[in-house]
Structure formats: structure tokens, C-alpha cells
Amino acid sequence: MQPLHLPPFEANIKKQNGMVQILDVLRRKFVALTPEEWVRQHFVHFLLEHKGYSPTLMANEVAVKLNGMSRRCDTVVYGQTGLKPLMIVEYKRPDVEITQKVFNQISRYNIVLEVEYLVVSNGMKHYCCKVDLQNGTYTFLKDIPAYAEL
């Protein structure tokens, strides 16, 4: 897999039945090592090791019902009680450009979850915005906030 614009980490990778897998530390199981999963695992480790996030307050592949259809948020970060979601993170493969369409996707998830922070990353570029739910506006931030800043 290609190097990303994220700090390296000790990935637990194995090959089983001809398929390369990586340990998802949040789901506590091995999953297929796709380019998008490579980005996800790097970003999750970045949040855990460099931004003070807790693995007990994060979840991957969170199901949401949107217009009667089931969708999955790539990563959701929760508040201290573990009940209120604070952040949604959407991942794309490194070769996928981050476009308005990607932001539209994560914004639709936010109709359901109503978080204050939206993050999109393809491993090469990362965008974070703070959402003002009352006014329906958002502000892009220069950096991904530490958990203590959420």
C-alpha cells in the first residue's frame, strides 16, 4: 500500500485464504485490506495516538437510516458518555479526489446524527469543518481538533 500523509503506525496485517487483511482496532477483527481501509486504519490510529481520542468512544461502520435506506458512516466519534455523536469521518481511497459530492454524502449522514464536526480524508488530503447546526452553516478548520477540543 502507498504511503499516506498521515503518521505511520504498526499495522497488523495477515493473509488468509489468499486475501490480505488488516486488524481494525475499533471493530477488533481483521477486515479486507482495501485502499480505503488503509486510509481508515491510518486515520483512526492518527486520532488515537496523536489527537487523544479513545477507542471506546469511536466506532467504524456505524449504521444510520436515511430516507428509509440503511447507510454506513465510516467512523463516528462519541462524547464522554458514549451516547452523543460528535464527529463523522468519511474516507476515500487515495486516488479519489475530495469533491463537493463527498461533502454532500457526509452532510446527508449528519441529517441523522447532528454532529458538530465533519471530516473527510483520502489519506493525502484531510478536511475538517465545524458545523453550526442552528444556522445551517459550517467553518473549515486548519487542523483536526484534539479530542479535548471537541
Image: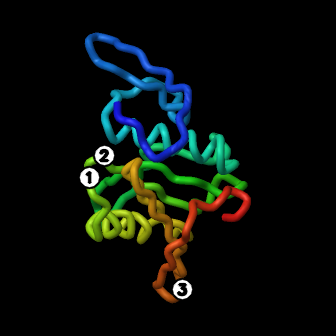
Q: Are marks 1 and 2 in contact (CB under 8 Å)?
A: yes
The residue lying toward the viewer, choosing from 97 and 83, is 97
Residue 120 image point, x, y percent: 42, 59
Outermost residue, bottom side: 135
Which circle's residue, 3 or 1, is located before the other in the chain? Answer: 1
Amino acid carrying mark 3 in the image: Gln
- Residue occupied by mark 3: 134
Residue 83 image point, x, y percent: 63, 56
- Residue occupied by mark 1: 96
Residue 1 image point, x, y percent: 34, 30
Tell me which residue sits at (54%, 36%) in the image: 26
Tell me the SS state at disc 2: loop
The residue lying toward the viewer, choosing from 75 and 72, is 75
How dense is the environment of label 3, judged by Cα within 10 Å: few (below 14), some, or many (20 and up)? few
- Mark 3 or 1, which is nearer the eye? 1
- Residue occupied by mark 2: 93
Tell me the SS state at disc 3: loop
Residue 101 as seen in the image, left or right of residue 29: left
How dense is the environment of label 2, judged by Cα within 10 Å: few (below 14), some, or many (20 and up)? some
Quadrant for the C terminus in the image: bottom right
Amino acid carrying mark 2 in the image: Arg
